[in-house]
Image (cartoon, rainbow, N blue to C red):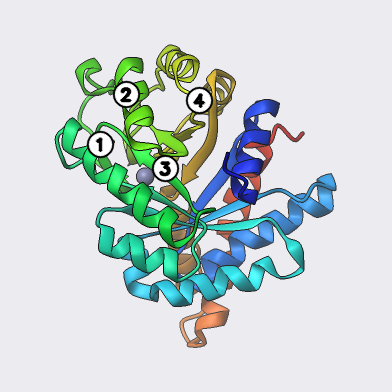
């Protein structure tokens, strides 16, 4: 039985039919915005909301794993429930680095491989990470979730994911049983990024429910940005316990910076120019935390 604090928070979210928010960062303005939103939730709702901070290989490549870990540790002071996740880590080498740097969890991504090889590599990842830190939490990914965390062009009116690309409950069960992962991230109609000229695809909530029924591993939803509020609520009700948000924060960051640059052409202090980006990220995360935790 895994006794890590993060896992207990996820199981608690599962029981309460709420979801923990996972938010990516690659600079100080963004992480200050994310943690500012968590403080706002504490102040307004008297609830010390758990937060997952995430860094992809690209984001951590910019900051360094040790730097990201030091930033997360700073926010953990005083017992705040903050966790750091390596998002879409694809190799055992990188996995070893993040476990040793003090990350709490990983979204290990071997979905570029065929199913059986994904199982093999993910099983190795579980053994490796737990041999270094038995309380480290491993999420395995099954079936490729497309897109990229940015604005996407789409020429179709309404996008739906091909059913053949989605995770079947049987594959989900086999994957969890064979690898020993703590969490599973299935493909259930979700995509990374936000379409600029049409809504994002709907989540196949019946599929989420069927996967939930057949496997004990809590479910993580990637590509939350761009989904409608009712899609989030239905996905959580169907069994999603962690939701990843990245693109929405990046868009807010960019718009904030554009506004700063346009409003004062002589300002050159980065911390002053990025103040609006921080506030914009904070607003996005505050609204998502409210929704995911069913706070009104
Ligand atoms: Zn993702």
Q: Is residue 23 above or below residue 225?
A: below
124 or 61, nearer to the observer: 124
N-terminal of the pair, mark 1 or mark 2, is 1
Instruction: Give the label on residue 119, or none.
Output: 1
Residues under labels 4 and 3: Cα distance? 13 Å
Q: Which image quarter has ligand 1?
A: top left
Instruction: Give the label on residue 174, or none.
Output: 2
**Left of 130 or right of it: where is 14?**
right
Which residue occupies 20% across, 17% down?
164
Q: Is residue 151 above or below residue 203?
A: below
Name the element at disc 2.
helix
N-terminal of the pair, mark 3 or mark 2, is 3
Q: Which residue is mark 4?
A: 216
**Left of 54 or right of it: where is 293?**
right
- Tell me if residue 279 can be seen: no
Select label 4 or label 3 by which is in front. Answer: 4
Q: Quadrant of the N terminus?
A: top right
Picture coordinates of residue 227, whole percent (x, y): 46, 32
- Tell me if residue 69 can be seen: yes
Name the element at disc 3.
strand
N-terminal of the pair, mark 1 or mark 3, is 1
Q: Give the class, few, some or many, for how many residues have Cα within 10 Å of label 1's Cα (few <14, many ≥20).
A: many
Query: Mark 2 and mark 1 in contact (Cβ < 8 Å)?
Result: yes
Instruction: Give the label on residue 135, or none.
Output: none
Quadrant for residue 71, please give it: bottom right
Residues under labels 4 and 1: Cα distance? 17 Å
Q: Which residue is mark 3?
A: 139
12 or 247, nearer to the observer: 12
């Amino acid at each position: 039985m895994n006794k890590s604090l993060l896992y207990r928070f996820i199981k608690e979210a599962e029981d309460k039919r709420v979801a923990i928010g996972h938010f990516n960062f690659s600079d100080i303005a963004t992480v200050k915005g994310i943690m500012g939103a968590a403080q706002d939730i504490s102040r307004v709702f008297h609830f010390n909301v758990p937060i997952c901070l995430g860094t992809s290989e690209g984001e951590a490549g910019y900051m360094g794993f040790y730097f990201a870990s030091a930033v997360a540790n700073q926010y953990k002071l005083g017992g705040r429930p903050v966790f750091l996740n390596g998002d879409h880590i694809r190799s055992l080498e990188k996995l070893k680095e993040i476990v040793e740097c003090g990350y709490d969890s990983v979204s290990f991504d071997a979905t570029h491989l065929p199913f059986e090889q994904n199982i093999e590599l993910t099983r190795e990842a579980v053994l490796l990470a737990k041999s270094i830190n038995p309380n480290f939490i491993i999420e395995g990914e099954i079936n490729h979730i497309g897109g990229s965390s940015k604005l996407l062009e789409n020429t179709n009116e309404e996008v739906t994911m091909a059913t053949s690309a989605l995770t079947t409950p049987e594959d989900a069960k086999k994957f969890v049983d064979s690898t020993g992962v703590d969490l599973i991230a299935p493909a259930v109609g979700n995509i990374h990024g936000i379409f600029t000229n049409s809504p994002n695809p709907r989540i196949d909530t019946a599929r989420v429910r069927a996967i939930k029924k057949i496997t004990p591993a809590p479910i993580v939803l990637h590509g939350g940005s761009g989904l409608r509020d009712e899609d989030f609520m239905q996905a959580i009700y169907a069994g999603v316990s962690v939701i990843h948000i990245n693109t929405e924060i990046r868009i807010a960051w960019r718009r904030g910076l554009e506004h700063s640059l346009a409003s004062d052409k002589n300002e050159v202090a980065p911390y002053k120019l990025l103040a609006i980006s921080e506030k914009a990220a904070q607003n996005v995360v505050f609204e998502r935390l409210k929704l995911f935790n069913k706070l009104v």
